[in-house]
Image (spheres, rainbow, N blue to C red):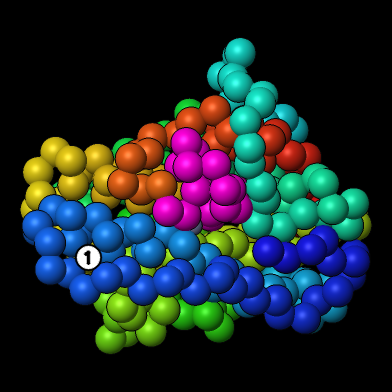
Amino acid sequence: MSEGRPPGVSEPVWLSGPAAASPPPARRSSLLSSLLVVLAVVAVVWLGVRILAPGLLRSGPPPGHEEQHQPLGEPPLGHPTDGPYTFMQTQADVVTPVAYSPCRPIHYVVRPDGEPAGGDALLATALARISQASGLQFVADGATTEAPGKDRSAYQPQRYGDRWVPVLVAWSNPAETPELAGDVAGSAGSASVVSGGTSFYVTGEVVLDGPSIAGLLAEGPNGQAVAEGVVTHEVAHLVGLGHVDDPGELMNPTAALSQTYLAHGDLAGLARVGTGPCAPRL
Ligand SMILES: [Zn+2]
């Protein structure tokens, strides 16, 4: 987990989650072996995007793109406020989460190479769950040929126009993305920029192991539910939630076998990251 960074620091920052222990050799039933793969999958988190400070590097877009005067959505009334949750990054006070501005939509593109049949529906389900719980709004910008990578620039005007790059959702595999080797089937994170002393996420990546998730989807309803849980877990990382120890929460990195939907602490945390400040100067 990252600690809050002092305002104005602009060097690239990488987050690496703890490597998961290797599961036993897959000698069990087909479904169980797939689930064992997923248990380790959700334990790895990284910030896959280079962090830029536009004022220092002069390589950011004009401020305020699509920014509104108030949040575009909000968490549901009566959402849970208890239960365990953590944040991927905090502000300098070490308690306030780094979050996306709720006053502009979060655009995303999909690199579809290797997407399993039903993968688009999985992503739609995960995004809808996170949006419903947080109030954050997602906008699909279609397909891209951009490959995922840790050195992805947050500002690529020739490819995406004069704005922060959209979130990249990439269906990948271990050959392309070494982080997906072995037991890992997904990773996600976002990049933050400091504005007025507050850090905001401006873009991010969700990288999914197409072959691993295809294997889950082939297992029927149980595998489908686990796959939905895995992708939801990764999108929750994208918007700022970290891991928790409670096995009853989806953000527990080893809970995928039994916990496939957002629980109390997950929902409480998502309400927090969905109600951050607006970012008119970004
Ligand atoms: Zn995770």
Q: Give 245 or 160, whichever is nearer the viewer.
A: 245
Instruction: Report whether 37 appears left or right of 28.
Output: right
Against 24, residue 181 (above or below) is below
Position of 93 relative to 259 (above/below): below
Kindly report the secondary structure that dominates the magenta region of the rendered protein. Answer: loop
- Residue 181, x across and y down, in percent: 33, 80
Q: Which residue is mark 1?
A: 212
**Residue 143 seen in the figure:** no
| Residue at the spot 67% in from the left edge and 24% down from the top edge | 81
Count of numbered circles on the image: 1
* Residue at 57%, 48% in the rendered image: 245
- Name the image quarter holding residue 222: top left
In magenta stretch: residue 252: yes
Comparing 161 with 239, the one in front is 239
Where disc 1 sits, the SS reads helix
Residue type, mark 1 in image: Ser
Q: Which residues are magenta?
A: 234-254
Q: Residue furthest top?
A: 78
**Residue 94 is at least partly visible in this image:** yes
- Left or right: 228 in relation to 67: left
Q: Is residue 71 left or right of residue 265?
A: right
Label 1, ligand 1: CB separation under 8 Å? no
Quarter holding the N terminus is bottom right
> Could you tell me which residue is drawn at 54 percent across and 28 percent down?
264
Residue 231 horizontal side relative to residue 47, left or right: left
Q: Name which residue lies at 82% across and 61% down.
A: 4
Where residue 129 appears, as percent x and y from the top left, is 42, 34
> Which image quadrant: the C terminus?
bottom right
Residue 192 vertical placement versus 68 (above, below): below
